[in-house]
Image (cartoon, grey):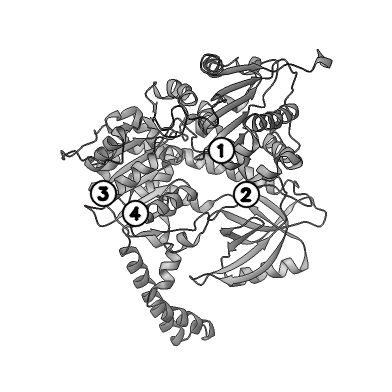
Amino acid sequence: MESVKEKLSKQLRLLQMEYDYERAEYERALHSGHVQYPTYESGCRYPVRIDGTSRDVMGRSVLRVAFEREADEGELDFEPGRTAVFFRLTDDGSSVVELQQPCHVSMVGDDWVEVQMPSAASARSIESHARLSLIGLQLCIDDTSFRVMQDALRRAMESSDEPFNRLRDVLLGENRPRFRELPQQSFPWLNESQNEAVNRAVAARDVAVVHGPPGTGKTTTLIECISETLRHEPQVMVCAASNAAVDWLCTQLMHRGISVLRVGNPLRVSDEMLACCYERRFADHPDYHELWNLRRHVLKTKSGSQRRTDLNRRIAELEYTIRRDVLNQAGVVACTLVGSGYAILDGLRVNTLFVDEAAQAMEAACWSALLKCRRVVLGGDHKQLPPVVKCVEAAREGLGQTLMQRLVGSKPECVTLLTTQYRMNEAIMGFSSRWFYGGKLCADASVAHRLVSPIDTPLTWFDTRLLGYDERAGSRGPSLSNVDEARMVMRLVREYVEMIGESHIVDHRVDFGIIAPYRAQVRLLRRLLRMQHFFRSLRRQVSVDTVDGFQGQERDVVLLSMVRSNADGTIGFLSDQRRMNVAITRARMKLMIVGNSETLSHHAFFRALLDYVEQHGELVVLQPPESEQ
């Protein structure tokens, strides 16, 4: 049996494998001559233009980078905190030349990003390159994140801090979780399982897990756990795997009147979010005006002079004082898991750490935050999307196994399953409940029989097996599409709107989600949606994206385009049942699946799903037109 330190050492080895794989893939992509004019890839833009330079409140140089965007393009991979590099092509266009050091994305718009440069000199250099030739911007491997995770794993192995070591040995070793004997509290606005989860979290001495299947109010439960904990502790730390999840938690906590400090760059910076960002709090400090003036004087003072040395000493003192005050005044310090390892949080210690999206976070990403606490409450659902691990060998050896998965398997006494869901009609919920959650989920009375219209049904599979639809490789790489199926999906959406009545759809703001597992199919569906005049009045009520893009979202009506259609039953990553769980649980009132039952039924999951639809919904075998029969 592996010891705790051996498990951490293995994580460190697997993380290095993942880094080496990503580095090799990045180098291959960047220098293979793949960049064309123009390039609209989600993680690469060529050409770009520099629309201005500025400084943020921390005095760092920022460039605004503008680019063209395709009309049917989905979400950009450019996100705040991601690392990127400017480049130009060689004269013959056969390879790429990197320009300056990597920068960091700080803000994102529809057709622009702002990037934080390493220095003012590097910003001026990029502006100069942009005046002389065409340049591009490419996301690159995030060395910083890997360094943070590697450093945290080493520190966890070598720790001499007894409270942390106790927690570490519960999370990875044979030590059992401990719980205090406390009076059970009841929160009338929560259901029975949510109340149990809050009481369990408050009583935990080491670790508690809130297992929240789709629509069961996991975030609501975590907010209550945080609020209740703050009655006994002056400050807690709140983390998640993604910026979007951290921002959502921050927003909910602020609505509860809790003082939140958001460390890092929010994915979407609203005025409300800006108010709790570290940079805003830093700039609002009474001593900030003096600091700003001192920074200006330093730029005008001779390098190496005693005057400049004295000014820099005073600047360092002020920065430390402001940082300390900003951190100490917050009831909740919130950041991504990797962000917890950044320098501004050095020295921060809290009793309790809360981690949302714990089932989407690599274990290695958790340790930086865990080093700052004595106990942890994890929230998530290991039956939904897992963390992204690109190296197949590292994933096979266990890099994709999360800390939450480990605990659910080895320490079930610390896990509370939320069992009442508030999203789906019970017919839509039923299959997921049986297949993934042991049949323990129940639909709240408010949603159990909810339909878009009394003439509607909640669940339909449109079987395309007789139509001869064929999958094919997309135009931009290995991603697959199915043109005929995409056209059928658009036809089914139109027929559904006409059946229910467009006025009813508009008046009741019925929203639609069209989900496809492949990006090529998503691009095709978006193009078809844009071309059809019928959908112009409903454009804001219809969204198209991948399964991953819909994680954490929900729609009244969901159409799932399965894409795969072949004679040998090959379905690729559709065999990832957790991804399919996300897809079929996005719908509130109507789920429509469009797919070839013969192809999909080679696999037990889809056979069971098809049988469920036949028993609890409608199976419609689509017929070819008479001219083709």
Query: Sequence-wise, which precedes: disc 4 or disc 3?
Result: 3
* Pointer 3 residue: 229
Callout 1–callout 2 Cβ contact below 8 Å: no
As drawn, the label of residue 185 is: none
Secondary-structure class at tag 2 = loop
**Label 4 is placed on what type of residue?**
Arg
Q: Of 493 and 157, which appears nearest the observer?
A: 493
Query: Sequence-wise, which precedes: disc 1 or disc 2?
Result: 2
Give the distance between the C-alpha atoms of the residues marked 4 and 3, in whole angstroms. Answer: 14 Å
**Callout 2: 10 Å neighbours few (<14), some, many (20+)?**
some
As drawn, the label of residue 548 is: 1
Q: Read off the magenta span.
A: 228-232
Q: Residue at x 41, y 53 (%)?
A: 250
Q: Residue 134: which quarter of the image?
A: bottom right
**Label 1 is placed on what type of residue?**
Asp
As drawn, the label of residue 256 is: 4
Q: Residue 408: which quarter of the image?
A: top left
Query: Sequence-wise, which precedes: disc 1 or disc 4?
Result: 4
Q: Position of residue 108 (x, y in %)?
A: 59, 57
Secondary-structure class at tag 4 = loop
Q: Residue 289: which quarter of the image?
A: bottom left
Secondary-structure class at tag 1 = helix
Callout 3–callout 1 Cβ contact below 8 Å: no
Instruction: Name the magenta segment's main secondary structure.
Output: loop
Image quarter where the C terminus lies is top right
As drawn, the label of residue 76 is: 2
